Image (spheres, rainbow, N blue to C red):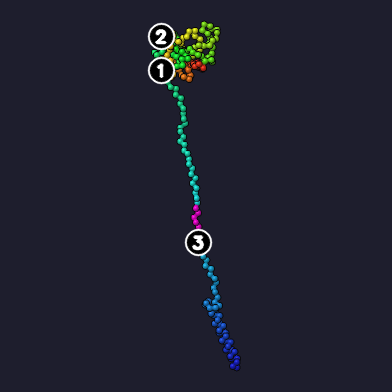
Amino acid sequence: MTYTVRAVLLFAAVAMVAGVAGCARSVDGSPETGAVAGPATTSATTSAVTTAPKTTTTTTRSTTGTTTASAPPSTTKTTTSTPAPADPQAFAGTAAGSYYFTTPSTKFHCAILTGGDLPTAGCHGPMPASAPKVPGAGASGTAVTPNAIEVTGGRPGQFASAGDPRFYPLDGSAAPALSYGRALQVNDLTCLVDEAAGVTCRSDAGHGFTLSDSAFRVW
């Protein structure tokens, strides 16, 4: 082999060895030029998300209640008070068993007469226009305006035409007034005067009358 051929072969061998060594240094990952970088690693950063607690606002509706204490049903009880008794002797007339009085207004002159066979309570005075006409005294066939009203124990109250003023004191004296709210009772007959209703006389048997100058009631 000639010198020239050997030189060429030697040169080729040296070049091959150098190429193999260069490839080996590229693959091992050294920081030399040509190093192959590994796959990029993306560091996942976990963001801490703070979830605020859900605030539930409860609105309390303030109700101001007005509590009204229910009172028991009101019951109005009408109480009829018992009139205070009047002293019969303060009204006694000159005749036995006779008791005379006037109403406080002096419109009516009244008496309780118990001396006869038929005890009677009655009054003279201005009769209401609505009073019924009655047989005239001494002329039974003629109807006249009554001048008296009376009640006896067993007979209902009634209007009458009296020829003589029976319910005035016989001696012509002035009878005392029977005060409002006082009851004059003699035997089974009672009379009293009310400022609004007028004079009332009744018997224990359940008969009587109430009289004013504008109204009346008999039973």
- Give the distance between the C-alpha atoms of the residues marked 2 and 3, in whole angstroms: 126 Å
1 and 103: which is toward the camera: 103
Q: Is residue 62 above or below residue 169?
A: below
- Residue appearing at x 49%, y 42% in the figure: 63
Which range of residues does the magenta coloring cover?
49-55
Q: Which mark identifies residue 94?
A: 2
Question: Mark 2, residues whose alpha carbon is within 10 Å: few (<14), some, or many (≥20)?
Answer: few
- Where is residue 191, by image quadrant? top left
Kindly report the distance in space between the C-alpha atoms of the residues bearing marks 1 and 3.
106 Å
Comparing marks 2 and 3, which lies closer to the viewer?
A: 2
Q: Are marks 2 and 1 in contact (CB under 8 Å)?
A: no
Query: Which mark sits nearer the N-terminus, 2 or 3?
Result: 3
Report helix, strand or loop for mark 2: loop
Q: Quadrant of the N terminus?
A: bottom right
Q: Main secondary structure of the magenta part?
A: loop
Magenta region includes residue 53: yes
Q: Which residue is disc 3 drawn over?
A: 48
Residue type at mark 2: give it: Thr
Name the residue nearer the viewer: 199 or 206. 199
User: x%, y% of residue 52?
Assistant: 49, 56
